[in-house]
Structure formats: C-alpha cells, structure tokens
Image: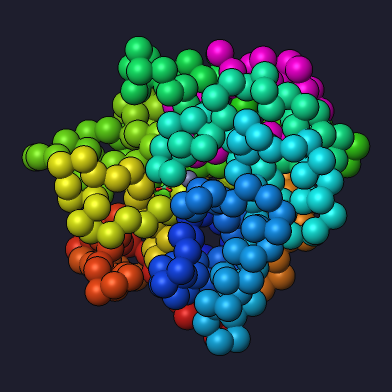
Amino acid sequence: MDEPQTLTLIRPDDWHLHLRDGAALAHTVAWSAAQFARAIVMPNLKPPVVDTAQALAYRARIVAALPPGSGFEPLMTLYLTDATPPGEIARARDSGAVHGVKLYPAGATTNSDSGVTALERVYPVLEAMQGAGMPLLVHGEVTDPEVDVFDREAVFIERHLEPIRRAFPELRIVLEHITTADAAAWVRAQHGRDAQGVPLQGATITAHHLLYSRNALFAGGLRPHYYCLPVLKRARHRAALLDAATSGDPRFFLGTDSAPHARAAKEAACGCAGCLTAPHALELYAQAFAERDALHRLEGFASCFGADFYRLPRNTARVTLRRQPQRVPVTLPYVDGEVVVPLDAGAELPWRVLPAA
Ligand code: NCD
Ligand code: ZN
C-alpha cells in the first residue's frame, strides 16, 4: 500500500483523560501537553470532584503543573453523585470551565464508590443538564455482579442508557470508551442533532481498544498492563470499533482514557484497571488507522469531531507524525520514586510525533 511517510494534522484533543492529582500532575500533564491542545479531565480523584468550586481548584493545580510555555487547556468535569443538586449545573455552566458531568455507576471502576446508585435519583440533575446544554459523560457498564464482565457494556446500554435517552431526547451524551459492536451500533442509531446540526450523541474510543482484543490480556501469561475498564473484548468488537473510528462519522472521536497507576499497583494480586497511553497516544492511534489504510480519517477523529461536539473551536496549530520507528520506554518516572509502565512498553511503534517546530 502507498502509505504516506508523514502526516500533518490539526493538533488533536483528548476527550477522556485521567490526570490524577498532587505530585502526579508534574508527569501526567507534561505527557498530554506534548501531544494534545486540550483534554477533558476526569473527576475521579479521591475524594471525587463533585462541584464547580472543586473543579476550579483542580483546574488551577493542573495549570500550575504545565510545562513552561505550554498552552495546554484542561477542560473540567464534575462527578455525578446521588447528592448532586440540580442547581449545581447552572453554576458549572456559568463557570465556563466545566464541560461535562460524569456518570459512574457506583462501583464500576477506580474511585467510583461515590457514583450513582439508582439512575432515577439523578433525573432532576439530567433535566437541568438537558436544559443547560451540559454534556453527560457516561461510563457505560452495569455493576451487577451477576452480569458477565464482558457483557456489562451491552447490558448497561439496554438497561440504563436507552431509558436515559428516551427520557432526555435533547441531552448531549458521550458514551465513553466504547468497547463493543453493540455500543457502536447504538451510537449510530442516535440521530438527534442540535440547532447547529451537531450530533447530540457522541462516543470516545481509546487507542488500546482499537489496537487490541482481549487476547492481549492473556498472551503467554497474565498481562496486567492491558487490563482496563471496560475490559478489552473479542476481536470482532475491536473490528467494529475500527470501523466506527475510521468511518468519518462525527459521533466517534478520540478519548485515550489514559489512566496511570504505579507499577506496583498494576503488577499485584488485585491489580488496578487502567492503561497508560498518553505519552504515545497519537502514535498508537496512527498505527490503528494505518491498519485500515485510513490515515486520511485520523484528523477528523482526533482533531475535529470532538471539538465540534463540545462546541469549542477547532485548534489551529498542527502536529506532524512521521513513519519512523521508536521504542516505547520500559518504564517512565512517576510519583514517590515509583514508575509507571506505558502500554506496549519496550515495543517498537511505527510512527512518531515530531517535536513542534
Ligand atoms: C480508570 C482509572 O484508573 O481512573 N481506569 C480504567 O481502567 N479506565 C477509571 C475509568 O475510566 O474507568
Ligand atoms: Zn476513564
């Protein structure tokens, strides 16, 4: 195939990112700022970011950790709980700094113990969000222990997302880090648009779900650095995600879900969920798109559709990728002298992002 050797794109944004807090910010913010102009920052700190005042304080800590000269912009989110007052939504919107409210079903993933226990409890908040045009960002997995872990996304859509969509047809919703053909099909079946013609339904897709099926978790032994939530699925689901991401459909856009955990917390008897992809995210996405000869579709997915969904201007700066192998470091420094292990540690990636001119 006649694959281009370099690829210049509008600078991308990451529409789903975990930056953590405290000393971790010195590392996480630098990784993302090197590749992305903006990121939607997840609120699952300990304790979670539940109101606008906390989001603004967290934003200030992120900005203070920016490398000198960086224009990286954190876009903040609130963590929806059973106790979120509907009045918080207007405050969040008026701050100009909060761009979404995250729904974690209680117990779904890392630091989600304060999540929502019964969706009807938050319907007044969803009503306020629909009215304010505030996006709902959904971790789409049921937590019912009776449901097989590989089916939790599909069951969530049927049991919970479908009723939310029916009750709030004008609500702007992002189904985060989709992992199944079922999720991609459900998103495609949502045809609502706002007055500007922008879809009311979006979905983020991670690089690791585009590159790997669940086989990666068990390749020759248990591979904790490929464990994330929602967990990797069968090959046919990966194929469906590649179809969606490379289709040019503006409802699908980039969200790394890069979620660092110190090596000891991953390589443990009960290891944490989360893949660290931020330091090489764009290279990983390029590799996935190249697999489908679809590099011409990367810019829409990485740099345009998410900005349009969030009603933000597209970036004007550019970034260039070159087809030139690079080796992923085996570890990267992290807090308290610990290290993190990036996805594909030690492997050679076909693409690299060139330093800004
Ligand atoms: C995330 C984390 O570690 O914060 N983990 C993950 O596997 N994606 C939480 C999340 O987004 O589910
Ligand atoms: Zn996440």
Whole-percent x, y for residue 43 in the image: 56, 50
Residue nearer the viewer, 172 or 130? 130
Residue 147, above or below 356 = above
Magenta range: 159-186
Q: Is residue 17 magenta?
A: no
Looking at the image, residue 136 sits to the left or right of residue 186; the answer is: right
Residue 201 in view here: yes
Residue plotted at (25% across, 67% down): 339
Whole-percent x, y for residue 268 in the image: 17, 47
Residue plotted at (24% across, 50% down): 266
Residue 315, above or below 199 = below
Residue furthest out toward the front: 83
Q: Answer with the quadrant where ligand 1 appears in the image.
A: top left
Whole-percent x, y for residue 172 in the image: 74, 35
Residue 351, above or below 160 = below
Whole-percent x, y for residue 53 in the image: 70, 58
Looking at the image, residue 268 sits to the left or right of residue 209; the answer is: left
Residue 256 in view here: no
Residue 186, above or below 46 = above
